[in-house]
Amino acid sequence: MPVTKTDIETLPELAAFLANPARDWSKTILLGLDLCSAPIGQDLLKETPTGAVLIGCIAQPILAAHFASHGALIVPPPPDSTGFDPFRTKLYDAGSLLGGFDPTRPDASYRKTYDWKAYLVSMDPKTKLPLADLPADAVMFERLHDFSIEYALREFLHPASGAPPKVVAIMGGHERQRAELLDSTDSPYMQIALLAWRLAQSGFTIATGGGPGAMEAGNLGAWFAGRPEEELRAAVRMLAAVPTVQPILGSDFWNSGDWMAPAFRVMAAFPLKPTSTGTEMSLGVPTWFYGHEPPNPFATHIAKYFQNSIREDGLLTLANRGVIFAEGSGGTVQEIFQDACLNYYATPARQAPMVLFGSDYWNPASISPDPTKDKRKPVYPLLLKLAQEKKFSHLLTLTDSIDDVVAFITSPPTSS
């Protein structure tokens, strides 16, 4: 049976620990603390910290030597030049990733944010590929960062108090353009925003891939869960001033700052308004692997990773109440079958609903021979075959109706 250990993430928590006569250093982990300040540093020199663990803590050499002499495990912080914090104890949000962004100077201010600096640490903006010459310590710190984010995400999903969130993931293409209407009906972007808005009002926590397009629409809908539909529609009209993220002609960069500027204006005009269920809080799970596309700021909690493979697997497994797949391309198709694989091999109690949102897109009657004109994907027949083999077809639905999706997620069938 694993030993239960206590994480100490703040100096007040450490002071309370030191005041406890029954303190046990062998069951204690110090995370990301600055131990140089007096009197904490002097107090720690009087301790016998046998078996303690210090991860990412700043300590004077004499204190580090004292802990090491008692067999403590010490993982020191990286050099200042790392460009990111590998020992975060909390998930990101728009403030921590995009702090300093100025909508009046969108491009220049975005290039100074933590998000952009972290991207440059691992990726080449010219090729959009990972840097090939990273030294071993840099790679190690990236892995430690992703471990820290995974740990913080686990705390978000399994809080120490209160019920765990009922998470529904919304997946879909980054190319969905911001628009309220398309040919006098709600655009795909607007439909996803409305769907997320309805689900959040029904008590579900929305999770997305944290980027633009359908992902932004999902987090946007949750942001407006405490507001009326007309305000959500007004926000989408504001966002439509910059419809999509795209490369800047003649540049290695994308129009990330210009794309984010309307979002910051929307957030200023419509601050987050609490709901009775707290489900206006939403999760984005982006990656610096696609870092030329910025994270959308509407996700109140952001689990951003360097490694896309860790991010992809985690995003699907955290959706304990199901996954909705809006129109998308290769990445969304990959996610559909990753999720199908999870359901295929899971026990019935752990299988979760799968919704293909867009009947003609996911199950077209026929496909044009010209793939540049017809991007629909005949995914549904194969997915249904897999679901029938492992008896989770009752958890699979294909629909165009927001009402049907909300009903299906709220009360999924219990058997085929």
Image (spheres, helix red, strand yellow):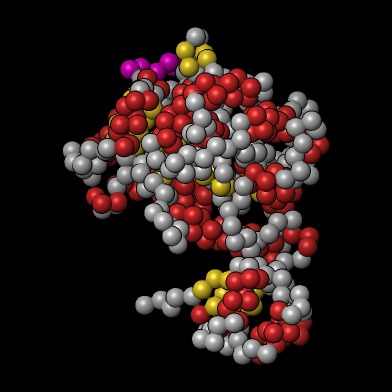
| Residue lying at 42% horizontally and 31% vertically, measured from the top left | 198
| Residue lying at 63% horizontally and 68% vertically, measured from the top left | 10
User: What number of labels is visible?
Assistant: 0
Which corner quadrant of the image does residue 326 belong to? top left
Q: Is the magenta stretch mostly helix, strand or loop?
A: loop
On screen, residue 19 above or below 343: below
Expressed as whole percent of the image width and height from the top left, the position of residue 110 reads 75, 39
Expressed as whole percent of the image width and height from the top left, the position of residue 302 reads 57, 47
- Left or right? Give the position of 416 relative to 1: left
Task: Report whether residue 215 is seen.
Answer: no
**Image quarter in which the N terminus is found:** bottom left
- Left or right? Give the position of 344 relative to 59: left
Quick one: 283 or 200, which is closer to the camera? Answer: 200
Quick one: 376 or 13, which is closer to the camera? Answer: 13
| Residue lying at 74% horizontally and 59% vertically, measured from the top left | 82
Which corner quadrant of the image does residue 21 belong to? bottom right
- Left or right? Give the position of 7 relative to 355: right
- Left or right? Give the position of 226 relative to 248: left
Task: Report whether residue 256 is seen.
Answer: yes
On screen, residue 181 above or below 332: above
Quick one: 168 or 357, which is closer to the camera? Answer: 168
Q: Residue furthest top?
A: 184
- Residue 160: within the magenta? no
Q: What stretch is highlighted in magenta?
A: 365-369
| Residue lying at 64% horizontally and 22% vertically, measured from the top left | 238
Expressed as whole percent of the image width and height from the top left, the position of residue 161 reads 43, 60
**Image quarter in which the C terminus is found:** top left
Expressed as whole percent of the image width and height from the top left, the position of residue 5 reads 49, 75
